[in-house]
Amino acid sequence: MKKRLLLFTCIPAMALFAACQSSGVERVKNTLRAPAYPLVTIDPYTSGWSFTDNLYDGTVRHWTGKDFSLIGVIKVDGEEFRFMGKERPAIDPVAPNSEQQPWAGKYTTAQPSAGWMDVDFNDAKWQSGNGSFGTLSKHKEPTAKTDWMEKEIWVRRLIDFPSDFVGRNVYLEYSNDDDAVFYINGQKILEVKCCNKNKLFLLPEEAVQLLQEGQNLVAVYCNNPVGNGLIDFGLYAERENSVRYAQTATQQSVDVQATQTHYAFTCGNVDLKVTFTAPLLMNNLDLLSRPVNYLSYEVTSNDGRPHEVELVFEASSQWATNTSYQQTTASYFEQDGLHFLKTGTIEQPILAKKGDDLRIDWGYFYLAVENGGDLYTVREEKAPGSCLVLKQNLEKAKSSSGKIMLGYDDIYSIQYFGENLRPYWNRSGKESIVSQFRKANVEYEKVIGECDSFDAELMQKATAAGGREYAELCALAYRQAIAAHKLVQAPSGDLLFFSKENFSNGSIGTVDITYPSAPLFLLYNTELCKGLLNHIFYYSESGKWKKPFAAHDVGTYPLANGQTYGGDMPVEESGNALIITAAIADREGHAKYAEKHWDVLTTWTDYLVDKGLDPENQLCTDDFAGHFAHNANLSIKAILGIASYGKLAAMLGKQDVADVYTAKAREMAQKWVDMADDGDHYRLTFDRQGTWSQKYNLVWDKLLKLNIFPNEVAKKEIAYYLTQQNTYGLPLDSRETYTKADWIVWTATMADDKETFEAFIKPLHAFVNETVDRVPMTDWYFTDKPNQRGFQARSVVGGFFIKMLEEN
């Protein structure tokens, strides 16, 4: 049964007014229309975004696209205005999908004859199986019931449509990987691209007319050219009068800053300001890891009269579930002067799943408020899950303000070589989620002031470094980059700052994710940058990883028990680790961190000396573009990795070692120039004339002042790149029109002047501002059209901060 908890609270009209105002720091508005707006950003699991221009135009979602319903309603003198989120209609199953119960179907993986989607088609020779159909091999789809490994599948499912569903809105709920086409009784009703999970599609009236009382056929074709496959679907009917908050407020503005997203609305006779704050300040790791965000509000009369105002906040148990069909529990309690609403799954499968398109289904999600009332009721509704409802009645006045807090207790965050680790905020095991909320409440005004100051300073410094458009991109990237990580402490006491390879393969601690994201953490806290590498050093130094080059990852999130990626990236990952280690030393002014790991750094460097100049056919971070040998940009990484080792040796007083490796790097660089030269630019691969690629790795020669490559190499490349730009930026290389946003900023930073830098940034800003794919910022997109190619919500946008890093 669905539990709906209501918490009524009354607060003095002016009690929090000063705290909810700007702390006196002038804020420069971000004019960027974000593809998606960050709202709640704690870690890869507790992550809520608005995918629409207006906060009320769609449901709040997890970065994977799954609904994380969060609804806000303001009642002004009895009139209701919805300002946040959108209600998902309450639905009843007609023919449920496999997450509710397995369903029987007929299927084939061989091309069927014409009319296969028709009701009277003879499918006697087709196989029988239970839905869903998907990959059950090593990287299996968790909901799959029948194994599907082939490229294509055709499925037929008979369903019964009872008379009591006639006349109601009908939805198709589907999950597909990759592309799929759906039919009802022989007629095509929907064609979708990859990939969707539990997506609801309201059948148009003409499709509903195809459904007859009694038996009907739903058929689907799904194509899966590579990777995992999945197809699942069901039919659902909407309950009558299930939408309660039809009228919306009018949004006046939205402004994304580094740690905060600010909204302004008109709601009848009052104006409403709402701010979401994630205090991800890297100078305070306890605050950074605290799993609590703020939602603050300010209500002001716009007609000069006092008004009776009530605010309602509803949060679904989806915040604590992987799928919407998991059974949950919900409760209310009061402790330490705070009132809490809490929800989580009944099952509590701690660290039981790993993968990319997954959400947390252990631990508990919380709403909390400082001032409580005296009326608490529980309403039961016929549906799986729970909904937390918090109401705040404001005294009749011309203005009032307040806050609620949202947070998550994941109990255990990461499994690290067999040992379950608590979140960093509870590394001692002596803290509790209540203590974290209590600290968040007590420190609220101080934290908001620090966030205001940080946001303003970031915009000012980023603008000075790279221009206004660059600053706006950095502001949007900030929370996305940090919240794609989880901070824990290793049994040894080392800091572990684990990335999740979002919207890719779900790898944890991937070195070629660390590399592009590192500039953000080098800029603000090198200890976090060490936390991005500590697990990789431990993996080799412990003997668990025995190869003479750096590993790609240490598992699949959240299980860090050893590399799970199918292929190695020997030159890529070794070069990445060496360059970032040198960058840490350069920022700190000493090489003590490198000294601690000197033996393994030496092993990796010697591998690059042997294999790095003319790389064999091996994977690199741009592997999505295809594998090839003689990669000129990868060779630069190897050469600068060797030079980084030479720099570190010099900083440690090992001058004889430094001289040898620095000389070797310069020797290789000169050979590179001869091998890669293609007239007015340098080649993609040494053996292919007429090709080109972004040589973004060259930026470290400039930033670390290594002076390995002749200056004219970067100058010639930059001049050539300016002739190759499309509407939305510089392609990754000559093979395709798509690009990588992080690498564009790195390439731009190779330029010697701000004007040229901005010439590369403007098209990137235009893409982010104009893209039709409304998802948390992608880093892989097409430069000739406003479309995402893949990837979203990834930490690599931390690489945007490389220009600011150069200035420091």
Image (cartoon, helix red, strand yellow):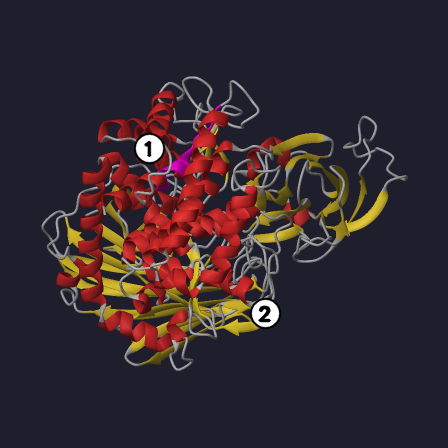
- Answer whether residue 521 is visible to the viewer in this image: no
Task: Tell me the crowding category of disc 1: few under 14, some 14 to 19, or many 20 or more residues within 10 angstroms, Cα based.
Answer: many
**What stretch of residues is rendered in magenta?**
692-700
Nearer-the-camera pick, 445 or 84? 445
- Residue at coordinates 26% horizontally, 71% vertically from top-left? 441
Q: Is residue 583 visible?
A: yes
User: Would residue 610 appear left or right of 651 to someone viewing this image?
Assistant: right
Q: Is residue 560 left or right of residue 647?
A: right
The answer to whether the residues at label 2 and label 1 have Cβ atoms under 8 Å apart is: no
Label at residue 748: 1
Q: Is residue 607 above or below residue 431?
A: above
Residue depicted at 23% across the width and 58% down the height: 309
Q: Which residue appears at 55% of the width and 73% of the height?
A: 419
Three-letter residue code for mark 2: Pro
Q: Which residue is mark 2?
A: 349
Q: Nearer the viewer, residue 255 or 238?
A: 255
Residue 8 drawn at (x, y percent): 31, 70
Q: Is residue 688 above or below residue 372?
A: above
Q: Residues within 10 Å of mark 2 (few under 14, many from 20)?
A: few
Please indicate whether residue 341 sits to the left or right of residue 347 in the image.
left
Mark 2: which secondary structure?
loop
